[in-house]
């Protein structure tokens, strides 16, 4: 059984074809610059080690891009399937499902319309996804499509954790509330914890730190999202590559007055010119880390701010959960940097967290316990696999139809 997983933006389509019997990616790639003269495709056949590297191809719109994608998968020389009948279904990542979608859904005209109506909550993400879904439904009419929402996992958060302390009419009028993101990643980690801890997910309390270019933390209580750091948008919470994370809202109005900025200009500053980039001029974590190690004072400060912000969230979620079975680090930054994991939970032994330096240093690229045997709370590094989670949910939805 093969599932095609698609993550579609306004000008980019990322894809993976997964053989579900072995949970193995057999092909993956990306259609770049869709709609532009410089459109190209990157593709890897992981079964036969064949590839295309930024090969120019005309893709004036998402429909043509989907044709290119499907043709490459079926190509006689570099493809991995003979025809589309080998694809069981297509799973689409959708960033925002609002309050309407609490689980993954089979794509119908009604579901597609509802996603379109939610585009105002995610104007940078949902429209591209909608274009992708419409395109593949047009060029491959027999394939079933399933939408998997980043926000769905967090629909179990209690109202006292998702309602903001502003006039309630703004929630009623504009649905301003905490939605949370990275939900697919958290679902995957929870499924892994269920096996690792040998415990039903309904009995698991965990704190999961998803740290990458974008970053968030989730408090999982009894196998459900209980609280999370990202809010109405992905801007709230941790220090990220270009996003500020938490700040005093009065800063926004101050900047607008003093710098004569529009709301769009402030939004651009907080989302694209803040975080690591704003603090030290280096958004890329690896480069920022190297600069800090080399003695760059602003890079050092940035790193301290980032790690301490993460630590504060971990501590606050421990207070909310009371009992914590595991703390998990995932995402590119956390998976590849033992020093960052250590800095985020160092000196927390009185709270029952003791890291094993040797285990932590060796943990890279695969699942690992990084806490010591006498740590009251187990700490893990678990690489996330959002595409596999999307594929699994796609199968579940189709089989129920």
Image (tube, rainbow, N blue to C red):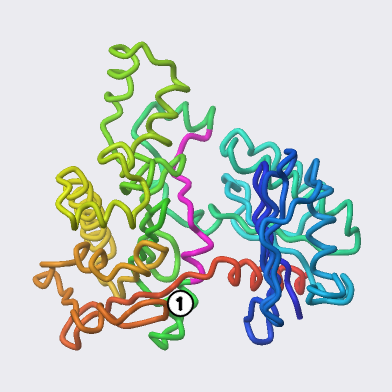
Q: Which residue is mark 1?
A: 201
> Quick one: SS at disc 1?
helix
Q: Is 290 displayed left or right of 91 in the figure? A: left
Q: Quadrant of residue 354?
A: bottom left
Q: Residue at x 75, y 51 (%)?
A: 56
Magenta stretch holds residue 186: yes
Q: Indicate the position of residue 176 as horizontal and vertical percent values.
A: 48, 34
Give the residues in magenta: 175-188
Q: Is 361 displayed left or right of 396 in the figure? A: left
Quadrant of the snapshot with the N terminus: bottom right
The image shows a total of numbered marks equal to 1
Q: Indicate the position of residue 3 as horizontal and vertical percent values.
A: 73, 72
Q: Indicate the position of residue 385 as horizontal and vertical percent values.
A: 53, 70
User: Does 365 appear above or below 181?
Assistant: below
Q: Is 30 displayed left or right of 304 in the figure? A: right
User: Does 352 appear above or below 70?
Assistant: below
Magenta stretch holds residue 55: no
Q: Residue at x 50, y 59 (%)?
A: 183
Q: Residue at x 63, y 56 (%)?
A: 93
User: Does 40 appear above or below 84?
Assistant: above
Q: Residues within 10 Å of mark 1 (few under 14, many from 20)?
A: some
Depth check, front residue: 103 or 252: 252
Depth check, front residue: 119 or 34: 34
User: Does 379 appear above or below 283?
Assistant: below
Quadrant of the snapshot with the C terminus: bottom right
Depth check, front residue: 277 or 92: 277
Q: Indicate the position of residue 170 as horizontal and vertical percent values.
A: 47, 27
Q: Quadrant of residue 232?
A: top left
């Amino acid at each position: 059984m093969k599932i095609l997983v698609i993550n579609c933006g306004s000008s980019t389509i990322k894809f993976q074809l997964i053989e579900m019997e072995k949970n193995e990616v057999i092909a993956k790639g990306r259609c770049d610059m869709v709609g532009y003269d410089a459109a190209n495709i990157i593709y890897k056949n992981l079964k036969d080690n064949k590839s295309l590297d930024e090969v120019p191809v005309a893709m004036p719109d998402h429909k043509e891009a989907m044709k290119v994608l499907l043709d490459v998968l079926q190509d006689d020389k570099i493809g991995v399937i003979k025809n589309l009948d080998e694809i069981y279904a297509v799973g689409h990542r959708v960033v925002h499902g609002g309050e309407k979608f609490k689980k993954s859904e089979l794509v119908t005209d009604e579901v597609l319309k509802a996603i379109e109506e939610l585009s105002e909550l995610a104007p940078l993400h949902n429209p591209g996804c909608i274009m992708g879904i419409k395109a593949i439904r047009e060029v491959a009419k027999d394939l079933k499509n399933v939408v998997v929402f980043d926000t769905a996992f967090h629909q179990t958060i209690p109202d006292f954790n998702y309602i903001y302390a502003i006039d309630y009419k703004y929630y009623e009028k504009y649905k301003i509330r905490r939605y949370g993101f990275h939900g697919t990643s958290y679902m995957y980690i929870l499924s892994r914890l269920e096996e690792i801890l040998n415990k039903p997910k309904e009995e698991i309390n965990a704190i999961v730190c998803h740290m990458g270019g974008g970053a968030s933390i989730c408090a999982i209580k009894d196998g459900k999202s209980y609280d999370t750091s990202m809010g109405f948008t992905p801007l709230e919470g941790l220090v990220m590559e270009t996003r500020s994370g938490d700040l005093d809202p009065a800063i926004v109005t101050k900047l607008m007055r003093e710098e004569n900025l529009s709301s769009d200009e402030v939004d651009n500053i907080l989302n694209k010119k803040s975080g690591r980039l704003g603090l030290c001029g280096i958004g890329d974590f690896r480069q920022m880390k190297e600069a800090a190690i080399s003695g760059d004072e602003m890079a050092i400060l940035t790193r301290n701010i980032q790690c301490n912000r993460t630590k504060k969230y971990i501590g606050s979620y421990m207070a909310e959960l009371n009992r914590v079975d595991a703390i998990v680090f995932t995402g590119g930054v956390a998976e590849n940097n033992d020093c960052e994991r250590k800095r985020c939970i160092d000196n927390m032994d009185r709270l029952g967290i003791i890291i094993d330096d040797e285990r932590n240093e060796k943990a890279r690229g695969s699942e690992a316990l990084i806490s010591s045997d006498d740590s009251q709370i187990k700490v893990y590094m678990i690489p996330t696999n959002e595409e596999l989670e999307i594929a699994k949910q796609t199968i579940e939805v189709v089989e129920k139809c």
